[in-house]
Image: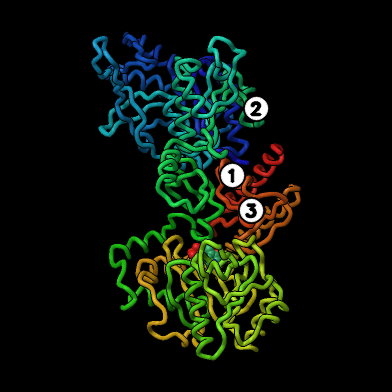
Amino acid sequence: MQRRILIKYGGNAMTDPDLQRQVVGTIAEMAQSGNEVVVVHGGGPFIQEELDRAGIPSEFVEGLRRTPPEAMPHVSTALMRVNGSLAGLFGTFGSRAVGLTGRDARTITAHTHRPVTTTPDGDEQEVDLGLVGDVGEVDTTLLETLLGQGHIPVVACIATDAQGRDHNINADSMAGHLAGALQVDLFLVLTDVDGLRRDPKDPSTLIDHLDQEQARALFGSSIQGGMIPKVEACLTAIEHGAGEAAIINGTRPDAIRSRTLGGRSEGTTFSLTSRNNVPMGPSSSELIERDVKSYVPTFARLPVAFDRGRGAWLWDADGRRYLDALSGIAVTNLGHAHPGVTQRIREQAGRLLHISNFFVSRPQVELSERLTRAAGMDRVFFTNSGTESFEGGVKLARKRAAALGRGPVIVTMERCFHGRTMAAMAAGGKQQPWAGPMPGGFVQVPFNDLEAVERMLTDEVAAIVLEPVQGEGGVHVSDPAHLRALRELCDRTGCLLVFDEIQTGMGRTGRLFAKDHFEVRPDILLLAKALGNGMPVGAFLATEAVAGAIAPGDHGTTFGGNPLACAAGLAVLDQLEEPGFMDEVRRRSDLFEEGLESLRQEHEMVHEVRGLGLMRGVELTSEAKPVVKQLLSDGVVANATAGNVLRLLPPLIIDDTGIDHLITAIGQALTKLKDKS
Ligand code: PLP
């Protein structure tokens, strides 16, 4: 698997020319075997030589070289010499390295470092270190571009502040920040010893692994002197999004090779402290602690606080990156921060948010027309959620039944899920004694069982409601012949057929609606979830004949279908109806299906793989929750449903690399859990 690796290069591995050749050769080999590689380097001994030559005395304060303005050009000269020669050396191995500094393309903006010390009289005093800088803002655009073109960026530890003054940045610190911002899979700090030792003087006390909290507890004892910035850099990297960070011996090219190319755990590895086995940074931890005190505990939440997303990726509050294979439970089908959706919402938010359904608005009229056309239905009513779409659909079916002298019974399927209002709970057979009297008139039959439906079907029945692919119930696909037979049965008896496509709609199954796979038109179609790609908007759609049963005052909503929600719906349809878009979704779905099938063949724990398009369930031979937790700790968001089903709902825009990443991650998670058991 291709990985992104950032190497902090320095120390003796840099001053001995033979060793330097071997190390650079190893790094070049890493890049040539398909990895994306960035090198960040310092150059202490070379800076020392340069300053000695210029007759500028060197002074260190808490491990940092005081850099008065007259010394900075010499520091710069020394670092640029190292930078040029390293980039050139990569060239001799056939690699295309590009030498640069933090100042190029404003990759790093520096802030002058002003530590505060306490004087013997107990007063606090700022220490003037001259042009020593801290890393401020990081902009990875240039580095991403270079990596995308197959270059090895070789970055010298110089950056400018907002006024354009060059600063001397500690190379470990700069490397750690860049590793985090670039979300590298592996951050390696090369040093002159095999890793961190519990007793710094005793090589036999090497520590292989520390989590963040364990590492912090060792500052001042095991972590001293030059190790302090190296450990700090590793912690910065993992807290900001790097997958793994390690300090290893850079004087042993075999160690670098076996760590990066052979997958062995050389040196000391640092990881985030975990809760429930999921690693958590300090910001996530703080938010989760606050959430526990204020949110009604309706969900057994996983210990991650998300902060932002783009496409198929999410970042938590500490900048750690996750592949989203859940899409907020089939909601963000177009991925996070989709430019078309964002733009439409922005424009509409500045124009008109809400007017009530006493009035007409252009976004609602346009969405009504386009959605009914796309779904092959005649009329639509907008809601705010799936459960409201279900309630509205049931009310409509019952109103129509009453008008025709039929009874109000709604037939639903075993394992179905239609929401969490009282009627939706009753429909799902989820009566709870504490919930008090529940709405009546709901009966369940087994899924895909025509005879069972036929036995139920009297004039008392208003409608049959089903999910063409059951979601929460464990991803079960309807038998096409059964759906067609149900349609015929309804046509014969006058009962309505209602499809709950709240989860399966809007492209999820590889067609705009799952019903399109089966070529069956329902009388009522329920939608929500992905209709607004995250804006709360749902709908029930109906044929002209059925919709005619409703009269003003029978149903309504305050928010439902407001201009903002409808603007998001229009942006979603724009994308789904883009020529070729759904063809591409189907191609990706096939790739995904193949990958899951290979997992079924390779892992005994996988019993069955089911689903359509990008809605897949992997039925395991044991509980799915541990797999979900393992995946989360490996940076993948998925979900467990029906106890032993791993439910995968990646966004429709996931690319081939994302699918490959997801399949590999599931395979690795299954292997890890098997090894643990
Ligand atoms: N119907 C189906 C098929 C669903 O999957 C869901 C939600 O998961 C709902 C209804 C309820 O939707 P909401 O949570 O928006 O009320």
Q: CA distance from mark 1 to mark 2?
A: 29 Å
Judge whether 591 appears above or below 291 on screen: below
Residue 646's x, y, as percent? 63, 53
Residue 643's x, y, as percent? 65, 54
User: In front: mark 2 or mark 3?
Assistant: 3
Query: Alpha-carbon neighbours of circle 2 within 10 Å: few (<14), some, or many (≥20)?
Result: few
Three-letter amino acid code of the residue under disc 3:
Leu
**The label number, if any, that marks residue 646 in the structure image:** 3
Q: Is residue 191 left or right of residue 647?
A: left
Note whether residue 393 is visible: yes
Note whether residue 517 is visible: no
Q: Is residue 504 left or right of residue 126?
A: right
* Residue named by callout 1: 629
Q: CA distance from mark 1 to mark 3?
A: 11 Å
User: In front: mark 1 or mark 2?
Assistant: 1
Asked if disc 2 and disc 3 are in contact, CB closer than 8 Å, the reply is no
Judge whether 132 appears above or below 598 on screen: above
Q: Earlier in the sequence, mark 1 or mark 3?
A: 1
Query: Alpha-carbon neighbours of circle 3 within 10 Å: few (<14), some, or many (≥20)?
Result: many
Judge whether 515 appears above or below 431 on screen: below
Asked if disc 1 and disc 2 are in contact, CB closer than 8 Å, the reply is no
The picture quadrant where one finds residue 633 is top right
Residue displayed at 38% across by 77% down: 365
Three-letter amino acid code of the residue under disc 2:
Ser
Q: On the rendered image, what quadrant is the C terminus found in?
A: top right
Residue 21's x, y, as percent? 57, 21
Residue 587's x, y, as percent? 62, 61
Q: CA distance from mark 2 to mark 3?
A: 34 Å
Ligand 1 contact, mark 3 (Cβ < 8 Å):
no
**The label number, if any, that marks residue 258 in the structure image:** 2
The picture quadrant where one finds residue 188 is top right
